[in-house]
Image (spheres, rainbow, N blue to C red):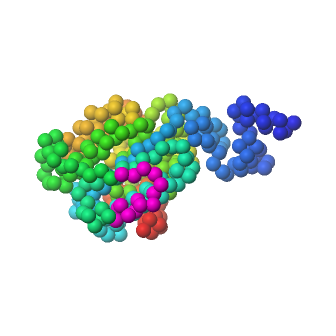
Amino acid sequence: MKKLFIKLCKIMGYELIDQNSFTSPTLDKELNEDLSILNDKSIVLPLGEVKISRKVKSILILFRTNSNIEIWDQNKKRLFELPKIEYTLRSLNSLLKSINFCKKKYPDVKIKLTIVDDNTNETNLNKIKNLTINSNFDINIAKVNHQKYRNLIKEQKNEQTFSNLASLLFCFEIAKENTEDLVFFVEDDYLHFEPMLEEMIASYERISSQINKDIFMCPADYPYLYMNNQKTNVLIGNKRHWRTINETLCTFMTNKNFLEKYWDNFYKTCLDRHNPFEKYINEIYNTEVCVSPLKSLSVHFTNVNSSYGLSPFIDYKKLWDENE
């Protein structure tokens, strides 16, 4: 009778919990395992099941790099005070590890990586290329053409600012033309934990399905979020809590529909140096939900005193060394 009942529950789409043996007979798993099924259901104990209505089919990752500029718009040193190329390589290495981890968990999700390069010298570019040689997913490199944007972007005080705006606009244009579902904009001074991409995709599905709308996601838990009395909502993701936020930097994930809906905001962000830089991106969060993880899935390796840098409660040295 027990076997028949379990079989019937499976057919009807219900899951059973045996708290005595700490197992799920219908899933044939222990309860400390991952009980969720991508594109079908998200299960978090003791909150039960969320049916996935917003399914993720593909993700385009745009990794924007400039290994020549130490810290844009600042005269400070980064944590560990090494040349910028060291941060770029470790950032890319951590991203590749996270992509591979995600592909093993979710082989049906199509993942494409484009490295958007801005004036990296040949020596450093070869180091970047060498990191990607053994990857088993779609990777290509696109180089920024500054001349294309000379008459679009307002004249800036220095070439670094113009270059930053041009490369960001190039990223947004690539995304607009090539995104099929999700798009993830990533800067080259973030180091990522291995489960980052898996957690973002699975949490995107769960949260979007619960609130019945698409969202924005930021992988970093920035220190500035704790420097005022900003109100927030806390949501349950796949394997951690997420909080609503109303500001991000230029590392965030969104979707094809929002790219089209808010194209003017993306475009205007790149036409001049605004204060804050992400002014028009942040305007979108007055209307749409944006969330970041607790605790962080990615760490922004800037100066130790930067309010936009190191996430709290992270072993920075361990994360750094793991991605050498």
176 lies above or below 248: above
Pick whichever, 282 or 141, lies toward us: 141
Q: Does the magenta stretch include residue 286?
A: no
Task: In the rendered view, tell whether residue 136 sits above or below residue 248.
Answer: below
Residue 307: give x, y in percent of width and height: 34, 55
Which quarter of the rendering shows the C terminus? bottom left
Residue stretch in magenta: 127-140
* Relative image position of residue 14 (x, y in whole percent): 71, 34
Above or below residue 272? Residue 88 is below
Front-lying residue, 142 or 196:
142
Q: Quadrant of residue 26?
A: top right
70 on left or right of 304:
left
Regarding residue 242, the answer to whether it shows in the image is: no
**Is residue 86 at least partly visible in the picture?**
yes
Give me the residue at 26% from left, 64% from top.
Answer: 122
For the point 35% across and 35% down, which residue is it? 259
Total labels: the figure holds: 0
Residue 128 shown in magenta: yes
**What is the x, y in percent for residue 313?**
47, 59
Q: In which quarter of the image is residue 135?
A: bottom left
What is the quadrant of residue 49 in the picture?
top right
- Left or right, 3 with respect to 304, comes to right
Q: In this view, does 50 lie to the left or right of 303?
A: right
Image vertical order of residue 21 relative to residue 261, above or below = below
The N terminus lies in quadrant = top right
Left or right of 73 in this view: 82: right
Residue in the picture at 71% in, 48% down: 29
Q: Nearer the viewer, residue 147 or 246?
A: 147
Q: Nearer the viewer, residue 269 or 140?
A: 140
- The percent position of residue 236, horizontal first and vertical second, equals 55, 42
**Residue plotted at (54% across, 38% down):** 206
